[in-house]
Image: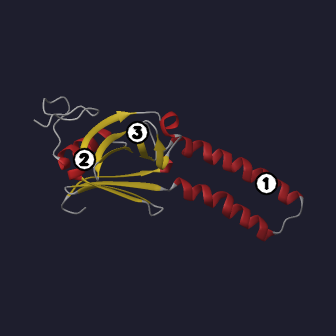
Amino acid sequence: MPDDTIYEETQRLHHNAIVRYVVPMTTVFYVGITLAVMLAKGASGQDIAILLAIGLGVPLAIAWLAMHTTVTVNGLHIRTLLAFKKSVSTSAITHAEAIRYSPLADCGGWGGPRRSRKFGVVYNMAGDRGVLVRYDDNGRERSMVIGSRRSEELERALRLAADLPEPGSEHETPPNEVADES
């Protein structure tokens, strides 16, 4: 961990109960049926090996997809196994709040990034907790949710790195209001 790192977390898709239980059961069911049909039709050993490699390998690979979140003194960094990267300078962060939300209802499920009318973009591999982050993107306010199994700790790290006031303090600007310029 570099010296300027305040927070690090890796979330894997297999932390998600649906991926951990439903995907393997469905995979075994479909591979089993396909294997029985192939054997009944006299498929070659090579065809059966290909079925097993793909039928079992692809779900295992999907289950090990990961999202890595890092907060440093200079920025928030999100990266996934599939080479997706998102970085936001801590000086651009205007709000950080640990929240609980419904991944299925709010953004259509897990995996990241996912578009959400309610939150902007959601980055999440498992669970229903995260941190709502608002930030300035060249004069436009943007928002995102970063899924986290340690959402309160991530919120504290973002507040520290971005020098944001504690929640409920008199200096905090409510998330949907603009601070008075006077």
In the image, residue 52 sits, relative to residue 90, either above or below, namely: below
Q: Earlier in the sequence, mark 1 or mark 3?
A: 1
The residue singled out by tag 1 in the image is 34
Give percent across and percent down for residue 73: 19, 55
Which of disc 2 and disc 1 is earlier in sequence?
A: 1
Q: CA distance from mark 1 to mark 2?
A: 51 Å
Element under disc 3: loop
What's the CA distance linking mark 3 and mark 2? 15 Å
Q: Residue at x 79, y 56 (%)?
A: 35
**Mark whose residue sits in front, 1 or 3:** 3
Camera-near label (1 vs 2) is: 2
> Amino acid type of disc 3?
Phe
| Residue highlighted by disc 2 | 93
- Tag 2: residue type? Ile
Looking at the image, residue 18 sits to the left or right of residue 9; the answer is right
Q: Which mark is residue 2?
A: none
Residue 168 appears at what percent x and percent y?
19, 28
Residue 100 occupies quadrant: top left
Q: Which mark is residue 119?
A: 3
Query: Mark 3 packing: few (<14 Cα in 10 Å), some, or many (20+)?
Result: some
Q: Residues within 10 Å of mark 1 (few under 14, many from 20)?
A: some
